[in-house]
Image (cartoon, rainbow, N blue to C red):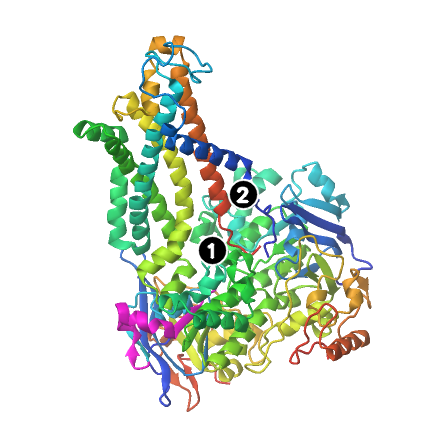
Amino acid sequence: MPDNSHSVKQLSVQNLSVRFPTVRGTVCAVNGVSFELSQGASLGIVGESGSGKSVTARTLMNLLPRSAEVSGGVEFEGADVRRLARERVKHFWGVKMAMIFQDPMTSLNPVKKCGTQISETLRYHLKRDRKTARHEGIDLLNLVGIPEPKKRFDQYPHELSGGLRQRVVIAMALACDPSLLIADEPTTAVDVTVQKHLLDLLDRLRKERGMSLILITHDLGVARRRCDEIAVMYAGRIVERGKPEDLFEDPRHPYTDALLRSMPRLNTPIHSRLEAIGGPPPELINPTEQCSFAPRCTLAQADCLQSVPQLSGVIGMREIACFYPANTKRGRRALAKNRARGKTAAGLQMSARRHTSG
Amino acid sequence: MAGSGDGSLRSEGDMLLTVRHLSVEFPVGRKRLLYALSGVSFDVAEGETLGIVGESGCGKSTLAKSIIRLNQIKSGSIEYQGRNLATLRGDELRRVRPDLQMIFQDPISSLNPRRKIRNVIAEGLAIWGDRQGVWARNHVEELMVSVGIDPKLGDRRAHQFSGGQCQRIGIARALLLDPKVLICDEPVSALDVSVQAQVLNLLEDMKIRYGLTLLFISHDLCVVRNIADRIMVMYLGKVCEIGDAKAIFEHPKHPYTRALLAAIPEPAPTVEVAEGDISGELPSPIDPPQGCRFNTRCPRATEICFIEEPLITQLGDQDHYLACHNPVIS
Amino acid sequence: MNVVLDEAEAKKLGCIFWLAVGWLGVLVATTSFAPLLPIEDPSAIATGPARSGPSLDNWFGTDALGRDVFARTVYGARVSLVVGFVAIAFGMVVGGTLGIIAGYFKGSIDLIVNFAFFALLSFPGLVLALLITSTFDRSLRTVSLTLAVLAVAPIGRLARATTLLYGEREFVQAARVLGARHFRIITRELLPVVMIPMAALALLGMGVAIVAEGGLAFLQLSVEEISWGVIINDGRGIRDLQENPHVALMPIAAMFITILSLNFAGDRLRDYFDVRETAF
């Protein structure tokens, strides 16, 4: 987020929770997530599978299954998004807010030509006539950097490579000139060279059109260079939020810290042992009232198991949800205590080899 | 790039596995052929980890499957302990199989959904006749412990485990018959970052414990960089550059290797980010370009690249082999 | 990335399944032990007044010859169930084996087997039945085998399709890499996964076979013994249908409930065993 004080607030999510009742219990996919996004900014939501990042995006896009129980507020450009959803407003999703998915074939109909799918969007939402829609469609393909847009316009999705398909999907999402684009793992299915091109494209489009972007990814590296701000999610909660450089150079939440340490990097020596995160993945079904990372956290103390730490500001734009933030005096003391004991308050063994935030 | 020739074979030292001029082609209808691998040569010394990188469609998975003979081989040889795996058939082939095992990309799909994982892991013993006996059971349990799966969970089925646990079970199954070579085909790309580190550590531990030789295939250069002693970069069924991991990462000579390194989100400091902008799409392996196969996207391509295919040659006397007419000499 | 968006499936068979199984169990038990039970002789004439409706003596009433319809329905079930079972068992063994072999080895074996399946499917079933029963005899064995031949192709094609689906999966490759022989891969890796959809189809198929036997009886091509089809055929005269419809209706009801039970059981069983392959 560049400068919140005088930029226009576009999207505001307040205390959003999403639950799915299932036979085995209630799955708490999102637990009280709040964030804001100003016009033209880009927010990265980073997390592993089960962190709730995709569910959050789908809630914004009104794409949840009917069984989902949603609470909390979503306000977009002054409109209550959840009320719009209840009233089944047309021409909002896909017009003001658009989304692209990991697998381009989720959005593309395999038996329709790529161009038809784009022009249909234009004709449905913007009531363009056939001819104008075709022209605008070709312009859009050109805009997203598809070579020979006229030829591609009349091709079927299966005739294109994965990278081109994703560009067609981006063109479709941009058809109605949305002011917010949500990209859910847009580059997970493609190769690094293509990934770079797609991310460059999203960057360029955002800057040219003053569009805001929510980039959802599991790859911290992807989010780092492309976002003004990153929110790290774990077990349905935002555990840390801040500028990419702060997050990467000085992670405060033990999860962010552990995640960064567990990633293999180019500058570490060959065969260096990775600092894996121990313990079981988070329990999403009927979770207990505690910090959800506590069972895997090397800093966990008794109070981490008793209540959920709330997201609160540290300095400036930085927010974390932790009682014993890593790389602070408090955190170091907690770690030393656990080391001396040989295990954390949650019972995780402190192996001699692992050292977190020393 | 996209070089041919066996210049990539090392002259000294005993090699556990030597692949020469391996070609694999698949019929794709209308009498056309998909050239998945064209004249790939490399060798692996005992105890070494060879990392194989390249974009999807470069033939790295086909290579893995060809070495363990899950594919039909068009031509070439795979020498392993004095035998040519490429020509073995029937029972002879079956008897070498336990020596070369594989870890698959999709951990869940690599386990039979209807079988208990204890039986999945013990399958090797069941096949090779050591089914009964306390020794077999202890061996299976010991292995389960060493890969970090509680033996008490042996009666569960694959879907009751997470992806990371399934990958551990797959590793245990592969290790049961005491293999020499373990081929890992994208073993961590389906896993979450935090689990990825656990599995990579486990592979390193197992490698030391059981004296394994690893072929590690991945599209993730950071992962390969961590685990591999040597790196082989492939493009459209050909070898571009092969050599010591340090040399490849710190002094990449091939334009394609440089492009790969520049395209990763946190690029290597040795290459310029601009090099990641290799243009165009990957050509179809059904109709690969003449000359060097990388010529359609190469920023350094000159006339010769379109006419003549570069041969793999050694760089001085280093463990660094390259197939390029216009390498980047810094 | 994909969080549990699907509603977690209910891993319960449910009471409808158990009702269906209960009915099938009772049916099998009564027909098996019919001679030991206090049931009239199904062929005995004039066990009660002819063409009388259901009463305490004759639960399902009597037919034109005064035979007890209940006894006839019970004994008739024997033939119907045997026909259904034999036809499907044969179809599963022959069709299943051929289908799995074709799907596993592919190539020319697959071409030949698949062609045979298509040939069987395109041959009109009724004509085949007519041909066989008129050429040979109308014994239980002939009728069962006729329906068995007709069951081979649908079951075989399902087995082939499922095998093709799973045959390229990593767990099959893993077994090959371990050095398993084809026989072991087929029996240990593929059979357990192919059996589930096949068993579900078999239960549905059994219903179809029972109905088919009834159809043959209608054309007077079925067995000489009593079967549901034979009883229905007996009670289908205009006068019978107007004056004492119970003769035809009772076996029809039994058949209806049985087939419904088979379908429900098959459907629930498939859902129950529908293997979840994701970790969530």
Q: Residue C214 versus residue A79: which sits nearer the camera?
A: C214
Task: Describe residue B278's horizontal placement relative to residue A267 as left or right.
Answer: left
Q: Is residue C273 above or below residue A185?
A: above
What segment carries the magenta color?
A: B81-106
Residue B15 pos. (x, y %): 37, 84
Q: Chain of mark 1?
A: B
Which residue is disc 1 drawn over?
B113
> Residue B95, located in which quarter of the rendered image?
bottom left
> Residue C41, located in which quarter of the rendered image?
top left
Which of the image's four quarters has the N terminus of chain A? bottom right
Q: Is residue C268 above or below residue B200?
A: above
Which residue is disc 2 drawn over?
A119
Q: Chain of mark 2?
A: A
Q: Secondary structure at mark 1?
A: loop
Q: Secondary structure at mark 2?
A: helix
Which of the image's four quarters has the C terminus of chain A? bottom right
